[in-house]
Amino acid sequence: MTQTQEKISKSEFTTLRHDWTLEEIEGLLNQPLMDLLWNAQLVHRHANPGYKVQLASLLSVKTGGCEEDCAYCPQSIHNASDISSQNDLGIDQVLEGAKAAKKAGADRFCMGWAWREIRDGEKFEEMLEMVRGVRALGLEACVTAGMLSNTQALRLADAGLTAYNHNLDTSPEHYGQIITTRTYEERLETLQRVRSAGITICCGGIIGMGESVADRASLLKVLANLTPHPESVPINALVAVEGTKLESFSQVDPLEVVRMVATARILMPYSRVRLSAGREQLGKEAQILCLLVGADSIFYGETLLTTSNPSINADRELLEQAGVEVRWELECE
């Protein structure tokens, strides 16, 4: 690395900013691919020396029957794909899943409820018990369950919740084409409640839903201008599920995912950029490029809520071939 390149990597690109303009971000997304990969790798090498990757596992606790009308989601009652006939998992089942995830190598366990919002009562009390149980195993605990109140956020924090996932999905401009039952502002308010309770934020989006490059830049602008940045930024590629409104959409070009990951890394140098849904369709080479330029976490396990994911053995082989280390955040027994 030349002195000039080192100066760029340690000053211009790794300085935390919360004032990114749409034009700047769109310019990054549209850079010649080699330039974008180079710039993102400079940041990634500085922020994540050794290319360490965190393994996270995701389990659907309450599947289907969601009141939201997300066009991509097979769990929405507004889509023909709704799979609400499945029974909710109990505390013991979830904790057994967490133990299995830990044994397989994960150190973050994420739990999903297909809800519009959390409601007080027995199910919420079970959620709190699950969080306590996951933390007692020495794992990070993440929950995604829709909107929540300030009091609920505080109770989750008291239970030891590490992170709350609440994605923005797409840009403010494209949002109305994807979801109409919840506003963008409501999503941002949920993030603020989580942040105020002292829980870290997991917030990202999905590409391949008919959005433009400007929409992708706009989504990243919202995320990168949050203060502080989300600690975790999942980048998803649409998995077009039969029965959803987006079932006919073509698979996104894998290099578009690479561009999104690289740009997210430049904008948010120290956030964890998670390679999430749609990874199975990327292929090994594109996944390695994502690891090269910014991704420092993958979801690990054969399902992501209701869509398929690469096998554990395939992921172990991928990480070995890429020459990256597994990141252990917590002391596991």
Image (cartoon, rainbow, N blue to C red):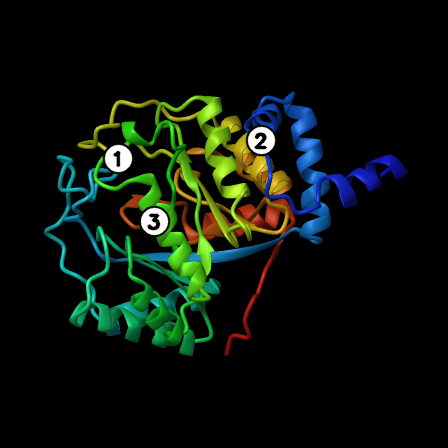
Indicate which disc residue 304 carries. Answer: 3
Sequence-wise first label, 3 or 1: 1
Q: Is residue 136 above or below residue 239?
A: below
Which class describes the residues within 10 Å of circle 1: few (<14), some (14-19), or many (20+)? some
Residue at 47% across, 75% down = 138
Q: Cα distance, mark 2 to mark 3?
A: 33 Å
- Camera-nearest label, 3 or 1: 1
Can you tell which quarter of the image residue 86 is in?
A: bottom left
| Element on which disc 1 rests | loop
Q: Cα distance, mark 3 to mark 1?
A: 21 Å
Q: Is residue 279 above or below residue 48?
A: above
- Camera-nearest label, 2 or 3: 2
Residue that mark 2 sits on: 21
Which class describes the residues within 10 Å of circle 3: few (<14), some (14-19), or many (20+)? many
- Camera-nearest label, 2 or 1: 2
Q: Nearer the viewer, residue 95 or 133?
A: 133
Residue that mark 1 sits on: 179
Q: Cα distance, mark 2 to mark 1?
A: 25 Å
